[in-house]
Image (cartoon, grey):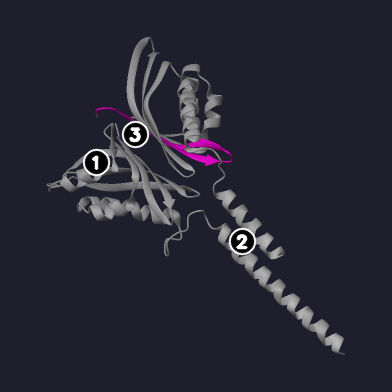
Amino acid sequence: MRTLILVALLASVGTSASYAQGDADSDVEAKILATEHMWGQAYVSKDPKALERILDDAFVNIDSDGVVQTKAEVVAEVSTSTIVQFLTESMVVRLHGNTAIVTGIFQLKGVDHGKPFAQRERFVDTWFYKNGQWVSIAGLVTRIGQ
Amino acid sequence: MKLGKSLRITALRQRASLMRTIGCLLVLVYATSLPGSAQKAGDSNPATAVRALENERVKAQARNDNDALDLILDNALVYIESGKLISKGDYLLRVKSAKPPLQQIVLEAMTVRTVENTAIVVGTYRKTDGKDGKSLKRWRFVDTWVNKKGSWMLVAAAATPLSK
């Protein structure tokens, strides 16, 4: 009997460690999309602290020029952001267990050295469920129509 | 004397039961310490397995081998290139309908980082003209692989041209 209890306990520890999530898929998708919005707004409000929580320490991003950015570089970019408007469209979340893929388009407007600019780019972000929360582990941005 | 023999038998049975329990627990501890996704035989290193699959994908694409690609690409694959979002079906159709001389993809450096059952690959590739081998554009890519039931599946692939 004791053996059975131990076996059951050990088995349950193994499964909960590999995937600890009780939310319905729709709730998870909503959470991730809300975090994506938060990410965009961090550029407008120049809030690097928001990104500290959202991005995994090993986060890697490829910008639309093909340049690799670390978490520290993205956070620094937010601090000096010249973006005044950040809108997202056509965002879709695809869940693969504890991994999620988000695709979408963002439109941003800003003023750089007195010159207004506007960009519309497509992105893909990879999210991972880690220590009880979803964090982004990778992203790529590319210009539309290249 | 009889009582002593009986006690010895009981002690031996208890020891055997304890050994079985320990054996059982050791097997379970080993099983639960493995990553959520078991690796195929010979692919004990996830980074090596994913790197091999990246190369296999390029080779399969070059020989229009949709059957091989079908095994690697997840059904919910999202593929982004040149700003366009393409599904697995569209991607396979494109490979199938490509006529020689195909543009060849030459993989360059890549790094693989694994987080439990997920792998992120960042690297560069260049496209060369299938006719004269002349180098065309260079791209930076990020691919996401997820281990599903022991097999690594490509769930997202995206690339953007290098501006410099």
Please name the residue that numbered disc 2 is placed on. B29
User: Where does residue A124 sit, x and y in percent of width and height?
Assistant: 38, 34
Residue A144 appears at what percent x and percent y? 28, 27
Residue at mark 1: chain: B
Task: Confirm whether residue B164 shows in the render.
Answer: no
The magenta-colored residue range is A125-145
Q: Are marks 1 and 3 on the same chain?
A: no
Between marks 1 and 3 in the image, the one whose residue lies nearer the viewer: 1
Estimate the x, y position of residue A85 in percent, counting from the top left.
41, 15
Residue located at (37% from left, 50% from top)? B153
Q: Is residue B94 magenta?
A: no
The residue shown at (59%, 54%) is: A14
- Tell whether label 3 touches label 2 (CB within 8 Å): no
Q: Which amino acid does label 1 sit on?
A: Asp
Amino acid carrying mark 2 in the image: Val
Q: Distance between the residues labelled 1 and 3?
A: 24 Å
Chain at tag 3: A
Instruction: Say whether residue A29 is visible.
Output: yes
Secondary element at tag 3: loop
From what the image shows, is residue A19 above or below residue A133? Answer: below
